Image (cartoon, grey):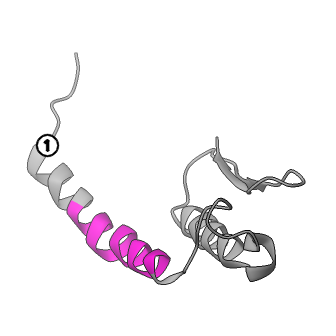
C-alpha cells in the first residue's frame, strides 16, 4: 500500500528550499556577466563561465544529494559541463 503524500508539508518544503536556497543562488548567477562563446570570444580568459559553473556546482554539493556525484567536466575548446549523476 502506498503512503499518501502530505501535500501541504511537501509544498512548505519546496517553498522553503526555493526561497532560502535556490532563489538566492539564481540571483547571484544573474550578477555574473556570463555569455555564450558566440557572444564572448574571450569567454575562457574572462572567467565568467567558470564562476557561473563553480557557483552551481558548489550549490549542488551543499544540497547533500544522497548517492549523487557532482563534477565539472572540461573538454578543450568547449564550455564546461556540470554533471550531476
Residue situated furthest left in the rendering:
8
Which quadrant of the structure image shows residue 2?
top left
Quadrant the N terminus occupies:
top left
Question: In the figure, is residue 5 to the left or right of 65?
Answer: left
Question: In the figure, is residue 9 to the left or right of 76?
Answer: left
Q: Please provide percent x and percent y for residue 78.
A: 79, 52
First to last magenta residue range = 15-30
- As for residue 25 lying within the magenta part, the answer is yes
- Helix, strand or loop for the magenta stretch, by majority: helix
Along the viewing direction, whichever of 36 and 2 lies nearer the viewer: 36
In the image, residue 48 sits, relative to residue 6, either above or below, namely below
Q: Quick one: SS at disc 1?
A: loop
Q: Which residue is mark 1?
A: 6
In the image, residue 36 sits, relative to residue 43, either above or below, namely above
Along the viewing direction, whichever of 37 and 79 lies nearer the viewer: 37
Which quadrant of the structure image shows residue 27?
bottom left
- As for residue 35 lying within the magenta part, the answer is no
Quadrant the C terminus occupies:
top right
Seen at 86% across and 55% down, the residue is 77
Q: Please provide percent x and percent y for residue 71.
A: 73, 54
In the image, residue 40 sits, relative to residue 31, either above or below, namely above
Question: In the figure, is residue 78 to the left or right of 67?
Answer: right
Which quadrant of the structure image shows residue 5?
top left
Instruction: For label 1, count other residues whose C-alpha is less than 10 Å away and answer few (under 14), some (14-19) or many (20+).
Output: few
Q: Please provide percent x and percent y for residue 73.
A: 79, 52
Residue situated furthest top in the rendering:
1
Seen at 25% across and 68% down, the residue is 16
Q: Please provide percent x and percent y for residue 37.
A: 68, 61
Amino acid at each position: 500500500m502506498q503512503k499518501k503524500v502530505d501535500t501541504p508539508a511537501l509544498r512548505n518544503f519546496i517553498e522553503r528550499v526555493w526561497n532560502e536556497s535556490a532563489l538566492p543562488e539564481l540571483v547571484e548567477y544573474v550578477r555574473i556577466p556570463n555569455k555564450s562563446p558566440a557572444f564572448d570570444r574571450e569567454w575562457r580568459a574572462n572567467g565568467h563561465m567558470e564562476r557561473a559553473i563553480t557557483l552551481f556546482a558548489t550549490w549542488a554539493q551543499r544540497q547533500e544529494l544522497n548517492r549523487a556525484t557532482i563534477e565539472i567536466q572540461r573538454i578543450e575548446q568547449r564550455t564546461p559541463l556540470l554533471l550531476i549523476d
